Amino acid sequence: MAQRYRITHDVIDVNAVAALVSHPDHGANVVFIGTTREMTKGKRTIRLEYDGYEPMALRTLHQIGDEIADRWSGTLTAITHRLGTVPVSEASVVIAVSSPHRSAAYDASRYAIERLKQIVPIWKKEIWEDGEQWIGHQLGPWNPVQPPEGGEGDA
């Protein structure tokens, strides 16, 4: 069986990651592709460079998958993160989630990217036309481990 959690230095094959969660009983498949954007806060990005502690990164990617399986029963997750240089428009991370129903797939996908930024030891350096900077904490206002409001109903 193919590994659903990977760290790579190569271009990510989105279809291959999505295929890892294909299941005949799942009616929802969500694929999130995090790419290098050209403009960030008015600065032109040339490329991103990622570094990470690979053994721990793999362990925490597996941990995220386990957390998702516990929280959204029956959901499958695959995550591939790229290290090294990632040019504009190329993917640095691909997260694929499948579930019997769409609400769980959407929720689990968002949980995966937010949790990844929270616990996976991968660091990003933004390279602009006029400088560079390592970017640390990337969490937004949403806390992925906070219990959802109003239950976990499914559409």
Image (cartoon, grey):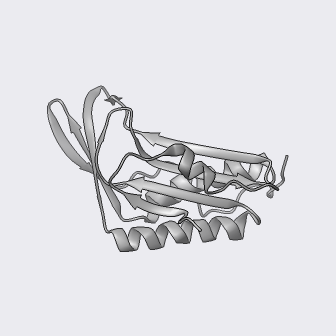
Q: Is residue 143 visible?
A: no
Q: Quadrant of the N terminus?
A: bottom right
- Percent across and percent down for residue 94 are 50, 48
Hey, which quadrant is residue 58 in on the image? bottom left
Hey, which quadrant is residue 4 in on the image? bottom right
Residue lying at 33% horizontally and 33% vertically, measured from the top left: 88
Work out whether 125 lies above or below 112: above
Hey, which quadrant is residue 43 in on the image? top left
Residue lying at 74% horizontally and 53% vertically, measured from the top left: 104
- Percent across and percent down for residue 57 are 40, 68
Work out whether 90 lies above or below 76: above
* Count of numbered circles on the image: 0
Q: Furthest residue to the left?
A: 130
Q: Is residue 94 visible?
A: yes
- Percent across and percent down for residue 142 are 56, 51
In-front residue for pair 29/52: 29
Residue lying at 70% horizontally and 71% vertically, measured from the top left: 70
Whether residue 89 sits left or right of residue 154 in the image: it is: left
Whether residue 153 sits left or right of residue 71 in the image: it is: right
- Percent across and percent down for residue 110 are 60, 50
Residue lying at 63% horizontally and 62% vertically, measured from the top left: 146
In-front residue for pair 67/150: 67
